Image (cartoon, rainbow, N blue to C red):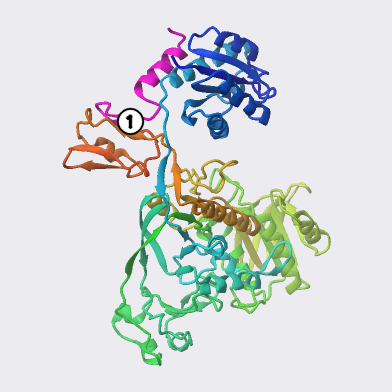
Amino acid sequence: MKRIGVFVCHCGINIANTVDVDRVVEELRKDPRITHAQSYIYMCSDPGQELVRDTIKNEKLDAVVVAACSPSLHELTFRQASAEAGLNPYQCEIANIREQCSWVHEDRERATAKAVKIIKSIVAKTYLNESLEPIRVPINRRAMVIGGGIAGIQASLDIANSGYEVVLVEREPSIGGHMAQLSETFPTLDCSQCILTPKMVEVGKHPRIKLMTYSEVEEVSGYVGNFTVKIRRKAPSVDWATCTGCGECMEKCPVKVPSEFNRGLDDRGAIYVPFPQAVPNKPVIDRDNCVYYRTGKCKLCESTCEVGSIRFDQEDEIVEEEVGAIVVATGYETLPLQRIAEYGGGEVPDVIDGLAFERLLSASGPTVGEVRRPSDGKVPKEVVFVQCAGSRDPERYQPYCSRICCMYTTKHAMLYKHRVHDGQPYIFYIDVRTGGKGYEEFYHRAEEEEGVVYLKGKVASIFRDGDQTVVWGTDSLAGRNVEIRADLVVLATAVVPGTGVQDLAKKLKIQTGENGFLNEAHPKLRPVESITAGFYLAGCGQSPRDIPDTVAQASGAASKVTALFSKDEMEQDPMIAAVDEDVCGGCRVCISVCPYDAREYDEEEEIAVVNEALCEGCGACVAACPCGATQQSNLTDRQILEMITASLGEE
């Protein structure tokens, strides 16, 4: 007969305030399946864990149930404590009597009775638990980073500087991301390029970083420690190996199309380098706009190139890379102006977004750092900045706060005053959020020293009137409506997930939330890990964040990768779904429903087989199996029935 010990946690008053812990222990001691039962005020504390270890040894326990908070918080803690006492860790279970009981009830009598039933249901499960051993998987100590913004750059450098090879994949022709578009950064107003460019160059020259720009992930197979990734290297129509980057071809190109990097404020050719500091600093041909690809004529770039690097017949190439871990740093985009019609987005030429204003401020931008309005090139004397344009608006746009808008709008207004001394900036805001080191002081400096006028209220409408842009809004502090005839309007548009994130998430089999951002395994305890083992998250692909937070998270993701690579092999949770070969009918239903491709069909044996390293134990196959051949380790159908019986209070 199995000897089971139960430990009930008071959790301070989190549990004890609603559940009568002493009475719970008394009831448990009447259960013949329970050898030992006692309570302690904080089970997760060091004395609490020591109590578990000592009791396992002294009472010669075969299994342990800890009645406390969610297993996602402390299951690993108590399993480790059990293992230290010589008990198989998978003979330790958590009964959640906090989130599932004390926190959701006020009636002490009913909560106490429910806590007893919850614990007894877990005891019934534990009685049938098997001792499991971790699945051991060899590790390929080579990482991939998807996304070449500041998050991807930082993660790549941290991993590479730890001695491991990195494949950095970026869909654009150059790394740098949106940080490369910025003029200065808040709150220090230091040059963005001065910070970023040395890191970009370091990535390009690093002996342990394989840089693959103008490339996209096509397919990912395998499992943590052993991924195979197919990457599409898009044809730049230029032989980068021989190209010297002289720029002659770009000067001769007759095509002019709006520059994406400069947010459409000036033009680029069909053959182009995105920006002067690009890494690699080699041109690509935009086939959609190239005269030769559209008509079969032109080839001016080819006749100009002295080293013969133009390759019109170049095709996309699919390459495979073997890696052990993947950091996803897909970055962000901003809500398109055209989506915000009430603010004149896409219709009024002097309504631009924050990134476009960054390019006007930048010394490498289309106006060489002079603030000029797009419609006629004149210096704007009155500029209106509108915050939360598409953010915090659940009825029409995005329900969340984009986090960086308050600060970069303050920075924009301040830098505008530095460029146009007699100009007047206005900022319409809902409230100002300054959650960062030095941020509050930066905001007060703008308001008190730089002459920025803050107007607390929403903007109702923006429209064109002659050569001016009229802004109708409200100043709620003054209790009046406001009309400003502005020369330029800058919208702090919402931060949204990067282009193609949803498709990429499906390829990687990682989760996204309701707003499209990548989901972490746990918001507090595992903030840089995906729920799927081997994938780590960094930067704005997960949620809006500023540069310091992005860099810190990228280094955190990199540290997880290097910790994984520090071992010859990794141990994987054995709580997987296995197949009973004698019962399996070979219907293949479980294969079709597995979200992790962890199942294959054995043609010779005519049964389903499980790749243990890929299985995440989600249970989809268990629910789908029509003959009960698939069972979850330590969560079999029999165990579930026993838990239900115990929960109903039946013997």
Magenta stretch in the rendered image: 624-651
- Neighbours of disc 1 within 10 Å: few (<14), some (14-19), many (20+): many
Residue occupying the point 60% across, 56% down = 550
Vertical comparison of 115 with 81: above or below: above
Q: Which residue is mark 1?
A: 622
> For this view, does 220 lie left or right of residue 333?
left
Residue type at numbered disc 1: Val
Q: In front here: 36 or 335?
A: 36
Q: Residue furthest right?
A: 449
Vertical comparison of 591 with 145: above or below: above
Question: In the rendered image, is residue 353 in sight?
Answer: no
Examine the image and state in which quarter residue 386 appears. Answer: bottom right
- Picture coordinates of residue 419, whole percent (x, y): 73, 74
Q: Is residue 582 magenta?
A: no
Q: In front here: 554 or 139?
A: 139
- Identify the image quadrant of the N terminus: top left
Q: Residue furthest left?
A: 604
- Picture coordinates of residue 565, whole percent (x, y): 49, 54
Examine the image and state in which quarter residue 394 appears. Answer: top right
Q: In front here: 585 or 566?
A: 566
Residue occupying the point 62% across, 55% down = 552
- Picture coordinates of residue 566, whole percent (x, y): 51, 53
- Picture coordinates of residue 101, whole percent (x, y): 57, 20
Vertical comparison of 236 with 513: above or below: below
Q: Is residue 643 magenta?
A: yes
- Identify the image quadrant of the C terminus: top left
Name the element at disc 1: helix
Question: In the rendered image, is residue 222 in sight?
Answer: yes
